[in-house]
Amino acid sequence: MSGGGLAVLLGGRLGGLRARLLAPVLAVLVAGLLCAVALLVSGDSPWLALRTMLAQVGQGSTAVDIVNSAAVYYLSGLAVALGFQMKLFNIGVEGQYRLAACAAAIVGGLWALPAVLHTAVIIVVAVLVGAGWAGIAALLRAYRGVSEVISTIMLNAISTGLIAYLIRPDTFGVLRGNNITTAPIAPSGRVPGIPFGAEGTVFGLVFLAVVLGLGYWFLLARTRFGFELTASGESPAAAEAGGVNARRMTVAALLMSGAVAGLVGLPELLGRDYAYTLDSPQGYGFTGIAIALLGRNSPVGIAVGSLLWAFLDKSALALDNVGVPREIAVIMQGVTVIAVVIAYEVVRRYELAAQQGRVAQRAGAARRTDIAVPDAG
């Protein structure tokens, strides 16, 4: 390889590494600066808020709560990221995981099966319901051209009404005090956690999030299907020309997204609550969208984003003790996502301009070489 070609190759690799490192660093700096400004405007000290939040991690069950929440956020982020790989915006993760958790709780509370089998049935039901609910939007998108954004928003609303119907006392629900809940899941269907004494218990299904993260990385980096999935999202026309069935990839991406979404509610369902109620946690699907954006659809990036989001959620509770509004954590979450999006776009444009400059430089060097070498004829 010539010296010029080697320089271009090294420049491209260093540029890619610089882009991967520069964007998140820039985003964190911008987000930190804006949050500091917000605190100063409100008359509070940024250093006091940061010290308080960091100190809170070592207090009580905060660290365990962060790990548990991060696992749930990670599953939601993965579900959204699978759709993003095909440039599909699955807003329906919220409805998919809630309906899946409700159905899994109903099935899990109906029978007491052998321990491992009982848990496996609950997980399979959640996966099938999540995938099936997302499959409606997948078929509408693939065969009727209906935007998945519109269809999944509508399906979210429908799932809310369907859940309310399913857990009515005259269907599968049980009235307990002032709340309506499904029948409790027997101990044979629960997943034991890892106790840390007074600090709390880590959900057993935290390891499921780790396994799915590794599977997501392997799918994208080591399989032909993952390559076709990414290629179809980057350029559908080029993928079609290469023999990839765009409809099949659209349906597959949304089905996988829904299947993972079906697991989002299980760590809490099988590790703490053991039943689904009208008060069961909501909003994880929308949080997953922010985390997938924060992690740029990377399994490692989503993990970092999930831990950061969980840290801001749980440690912010201590801000009230020092007179700092805990809502500043919500501002930090929103600003961080916006900063990441802007930072990656700025870095992308910078790297594109730099790449164009390298190509122009190489072309100029080639022209000078052609002029310098006399014609052999």
Image (cartoon, rainbow, N blue to C red):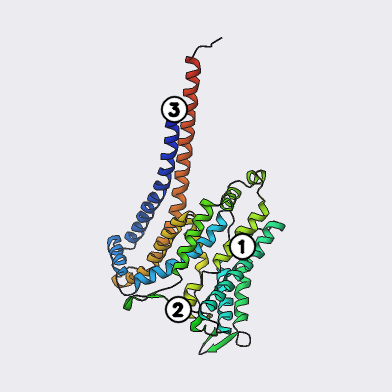
Residue 92 makes an appearance in the image: no
Does 186 sit above or below residue 324? below
The answer for how far apart the CA atoms under marks 2 and 3 are is: 61 Å
Residue 14 left/right relative to 94: left
- 2 or 3: tag closer to the N-terminus: 3
Task: Quote the CA–CA distance across marks 1 and 3.
Answer: 47 Å
Q: Report helix, strand or loop for mark 1.
A: helix
Q: Amino acid at mark 2?
A: Arg
* Lateral position of residue 48 relative to residue 289, left or right: left
Percent across and percent down for residue 146 are: 68, 58
Q: Measuring 63% from the left and 72% from the top, which residue is drawn there?
A: 158
**Residue closest to the eye, 99 or 340:** 99
Q: Position of residue 28 (x, y in %)?
A: 38, 53
In the picture of the structure, the residue carrying the numbered disc 2 is: 272
Residue under label 1: 255
Q: Residue at x 34, y 69 (%)?
A: 63
Q: Residues within 10 Å of mark 3 (few under 14, many from 20)?
A: few
Residue drawn where x is 44% and y is 42% of the image: 16
Q: Earlier in the sequence, mark 1 or mark 3?
A: 3
Q: Residues within 10 Å of mark 2 (few under 14, many from 20)?
A: some
N-terminal of the pair, mark 2 or mark 1, is 1
Q: Disc 1 marks which amino acid?
A: Leu
Q: Amino acid at mark 3?
A: Gly
What residue did someone put label 3 on?
4
The secondary element bearing badge 2 is classed as helix
